[in-house]
Image: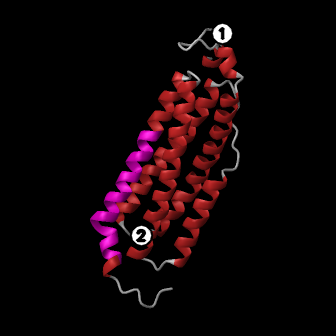
Amino acid sequence: METKSKRKTHDGIETETLNNSKLMKLFEEELKDIYWAEQKLTKAIPKMIEKTTSEELKEALENHLGETEGHVIRVEKVFEILDKKATAQKCKAMAGLTDEAEEIMSDCEDGAMLDAGIIAAGQKVEHYEIASYGTLIQYAKTLHLDGAVSLLEQTLKEEKAADKKLSEIALDSVNAQAASEDGSDLW
């Protein structure tokens, strides 16, 4: 395993020291957090898919659900690199974001308004994940966990692409449709 060697890194720190560092402990805690978050999303995204009326949004969410299932597997591989059991720790941020998504889906009228709300909720999730994976990558680089960096970078790339796709769908169709609908009787 990558973390078991006693070699010195390019900055002169022994790998064993890095493995027992405070940064490694923080990395492991953040990894548990994102593991829970990704697992939570494998349950939340299907609810969004079920509620959306835009075929383009539905397809984007279905594609990202498949990617999210892959993210779970990648995080498990990072745990393997650390020679640790994959363990989830409740992510309060993701719990809040998914609760907010549920609220949007129950409060919004079906159609373009709901689709716009789903996009907003989805983008909040993506931005949280982008920040989380960016942080994990920086920790992994400092800890010289090259295999973990590679896995985490793959996921970060997919999260950024999902956010971009949601922006495109919002701009190209959903937001304009929602803007053209009368909302004087809502809220």
Label 1 near label 2: C-beta < 8 Å?
A: no
Drawn side of residue 59 relative to residue 127, left or right: left
Coordinates of residue 51 in the picture (x, y in percent) = 48, 69
- Between the residue at mark 2 and the residue at mark 1, the CA separation in whole angstroms equals 53 Å
Q: Quadrant of residue 13?
A: top right
The residue positioned 60% from the left and 49% from the top of the image is 37
> Where are the magenta residues, as a range?
156-178
Instruction: Tally the marks.
Output: 2
The residue positioned 40% from the left and 86% from the top of the image is 183
Amino acid at the residue labelled 1: Lys
**SS at badge 2:** helix
* Mark identifier at residue 170: none
Coordinates of residue 29 in the picture (x, y in percent) = 68, 38
> What's the coloring here?
secondary structure
Coordinates of residue 50 in the picture (x, y in percent) = 49, 66
Amino acid at the residue labelled 2: Asp
Q: Which residue is mark 1?
A: 6
Pick the residue in front: 98 or 144. Answer: 144
Q: Which residue is mark 2?
A: 115
Crowd around label 2: few <14 · some 14–19 · many ≥20 (10 Å): many
User: Which residue occupies the extreme front position in the image?
Assistant: 11
